[in-house]
Image: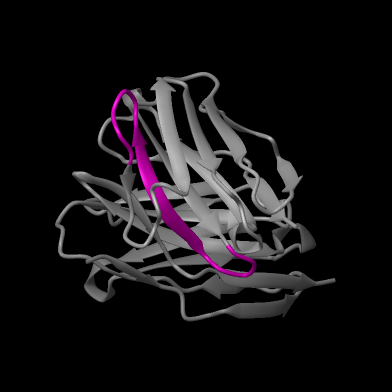
């Protein structure tokens, strides 16, 4: 149980294009999903917290107009990197909280999406 | 503010040796949760353990063991009889009751030499 999928697993795009990444909780409902970015040999940095049915909460320094997050259902959140540039190339990881997990704050992580912008 | 420090950036040990990964945390919250994750080269984060602040009992799971010491704000991870498959980056993380955000340490890259 508690499986989170991401699609695509990797994507290469041209500079200036937009890329959408999907995060799905496959066997549980998630009112809250998180999006992280990880540069090579660095730690995970939280970009935003995505809440079903409401606007995402972005961390300081993350451009909300650049990284559009939509959490339209209890099992799906999407991250759209708009007008991507080479500096947006990174490993993007989502995680989801199981509504039934109580107060333990446990997050289940997706396998990540590697974005390369040429 | 919460903080997690993993002072060891990289560690290399010969296979079958024991290795301990250090994690020191800072939080003002009285109820908090500590985690360890493994990130192999594939990139996917693998959950290893969660420990609640009110449970200081150490835990052993096969070759893995964790030492939680509230007095020193540490949550160290030991692998006994290391194997090549243990090679990965290991992250320690922290969150608190009422704050869902996970604060990650910078990670320790562990290399097991055959």
**Which residue is more in the foreground, B67 or A61?**
A61
Furthest-right residue in this view: B114
B70 over A74 or under it: above or below: below
Q: Is residue B101 left or right of residue A92?
A: left
Which percent across, then down, holds residue B96?
A: 24, 51
Q: Position of residue B46 (x, y in %)?
A: 58, 47
Q: Quadrant of residue A111?
A: top right
Q: Nearer the viewer, residue A116 or B2?
A: A116
> In this view of the protein, which residue sits in the foreground, B110 or B45?
B45
- Asked whether B5 falls inside the magenta stretch, the response is no
Does the image show residue B62?
Answer: no
With A62 as the anchor, is A2 left or right in this view?
right
In the image, what residue occupies the spot 61% across and 42% down? A18
> Residue placed at 27% from the left, 75% from the top?
B72
Q: Is residue B88 above or below residue B53?
A: below
Q: Position of residue B110 (x, y in %)?
A: 66, 71
How many marks can you see?
A: 0
Magenta span: A39-56
Question: For residue A40: magenta?
Answer: yes
Q: Quadrant of the C terminus of chain A?
A: bottom right
Query: Residue A113: x and y, percent?
Result: 65, 44
Q: Is residue B34 left or right of residue B84?
A: left
Q: Is residue A8 visible?
A: yes
Horizontal placement of A91 versus A51: left or right?
Answer: right
Residue pictured at 59% horizontal, 64% vertical:
A39
As displayed, is residue B70 above or below residue A33?
below
Q: Indicate the quadrant containing the N terminus of chain A: top left, top right, bottom left or bottom right.
A: top right
Visual colour scheme: one colour
């Amino acid at each position: 149980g508690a499986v989170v999928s991401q699609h695509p697993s990797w994507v290469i795009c041209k500079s200036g294009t937009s890329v959408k990444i999907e995060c799905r909780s496959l066997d549980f409902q998630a009112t809250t999903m998180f999006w992280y970015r990880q540069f090579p040999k660095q730690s995970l940095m939280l970009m935003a917290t995505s809440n079903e049915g409401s606007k995402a909460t972005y961390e300081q320094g993350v451009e909300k107009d650049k990284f559009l997050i939509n959490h339209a259902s209890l099992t799906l959140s999407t991250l759209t990197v708009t007008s991507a540039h080479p500096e947006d190339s990174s490993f993007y990881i989502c995680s989801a909280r199981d509504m039934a997990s109580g107060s333990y704050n446990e997050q289940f992580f997706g396998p990540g999406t590697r974005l390369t912008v040429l | 503010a919460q903080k997690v420090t993993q002072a060891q950036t990289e560690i290399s040990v010969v296979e079958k040796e024991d290795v301990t990964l250090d994690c020191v945390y800072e939080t003002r919250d009285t109820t908090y949760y500590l985690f360890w994750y493994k990130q192999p080269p594939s990139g996917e984060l693998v959950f290893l353990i969660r420990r609640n602040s009110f449970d200081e009992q150490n835990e052993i799971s096969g070759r893995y063991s964790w030492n939680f010491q509230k007095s020193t704000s540490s949550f160290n991870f030991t692998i006994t009889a290391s194997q090549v498959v243990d090679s990965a980056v290991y992250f320690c993380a922290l969150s608190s009751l009422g704050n869902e955000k996970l604060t990650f340490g910078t990670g320790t890259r562990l290399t097991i030499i055959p």
